[in-house]
Amino acid sequence: MLFHMPARLYFGSGEINNLKLIIDEYLKVKNPVLVTDKGIVESGLLTNILKLFPGIKIFDEIEPNPKSDTINKIAKEMRKLNPDLIIGFGGGSPLDAGKALALLGTNHGSIEDYEGKEKYKNDPLPFLAIPTTCGTGSEVTWVSVITDVNRKFKMSIKGPKMYPAVSIVDPDLIKTLPPKIIASTGLDALTHAVEAYLSKPATLITDNHAVKAVKLILGAIEGAYDDIENHHTERENLMYGSTIAGFAFGNSDVTAVHCISESIGALYDIPHGVANSIFLPHVLSYNLPECFIKMATLARHIGIDEKDDMSAAKAFIQKIKALSNRLGIPLFKDLKIGKDQFEIISKMSFENNSTPSNPRQLEQEDYHNILENAYES
């Protein structure tokens, strides 16, 4: 079995303070640029970084579900600067955008030209990932997900050279996240771990990371949601769980939850973590007949004491549903997406590259049924 994770990872509270040392002495670059979003700029999280790197060029136009036209526009300006490092600072969107821009820093054309695996001719620029939410996993994966605005389709652009050269995962960077972001990004990380464990390409190594991530995330998310600033242990465990969930799904795959959430994100700009949070229990219910034994294993690891595997698996799904309700995750119907849209959503979900990784076979009609079942509950 293959397990690949070449990113150099710095993990722990205060690690962001080593940024200049990492850039100067390890990466040895002179002309970095920074990719983020306007919310990060307004939050003040960049204040100390800007003191360390006065005059650094900041591209802060990245939106949720980063768009191909935004990436292509920034790439044209960025190429004129001839940077030698791309720093992605923020949630999953700035990190995915940073990877895409690292690729376009050394390769001609538009980001749409590179959809798929290893379509780049030249190695991308070095990329440094600094996550500020607890759900992305992008800091330890080789994939950049960008929305093609013409097709309204989320492209996966990937290759072994797209792993970050360095990732700094500092739990203190999420101290000021509002509870609703903790909820959606934390459950996004849980989705990564659970899907990695249940997906067809799962291995012994990815299973070990996935199970550990599930235990960490479910043990920490409520305390972090209640008081992220003062619950240091929960904050650290949530970020640790998110990172090793990235190890897991980055080396196995995701399943139908992501197929649906990526379709909805591309079509209606729904935040990725929110969509994953909504559909996780419903996809688990669909997959139950095929993988209730593995679900029961997860249930017992988090303290669900049911001797019968099917009962334990069902209790695991109910725990996730109850947790989503406790954390204020909206229902599918709350997204105001009409049922007349189910056909296009189910079609796009079925066409997603991760559909074959789902543990139970799925046809387009099955996706449609999952959407129907999720709408009211």
Image (cartoon, rainbow, N blue to C red):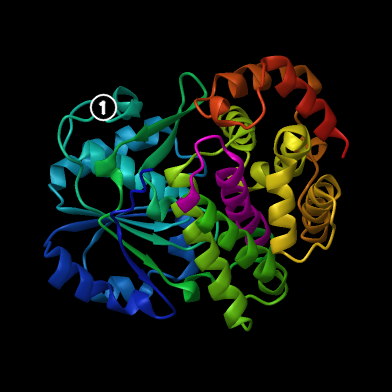
Q: Residue, x 53% and y 70% (percent of image)? A: 174
Q: Residue, x 84% and y 30% (percent of image)? A: 373
Mark 1 highlights which residue? 119
For the image, the number of numbered tags is 1
**Image coordinates for residue 319, horizontal then vertical, percent:** 81, 56
Report the side of 116 relative to 357 (left or right).
left
Q: Nearer the viewer, residue 192 or 64?
A: 192
State whether residue 68 appears in this view.
yes
Q: Secondary structure at mark 1?
A: loop
**Taking 216 as reference, is 71 above or below it?**
above
**Image coordinates for residue 323, horizontal then vertical, percent:** 79, 58
Q: Main secondary structure of the magenta part?
A: helix
Which quadrant would residue 181 be assigned to in this image? bottom right
Furthest residue to the front?
307
Report the side of 374 relative to 185 (left or right).
right
Which residues are drawn in magenta?
Answer: 182-205
Which quadrant would residue 104 be assigned to in this image? top left
The quadrant in which the N terminus is found is top left
**Image coordinates for residue 268, horizontal then vertical, percent:** 63, 31
Which quadrant would residue 105 be assigned to in this image? top left
Q: Residue, x 59% and y 67% (percent of image)? A: 177
**Taking 82 as reference, is 183 above or below it?**
below
State whether residue 61 appears in this view.
no
In the image, residue 36 lies in the stretch drawn in magenta: no
- Amino acid type of the residue tagged 1 in the rendering: Lys
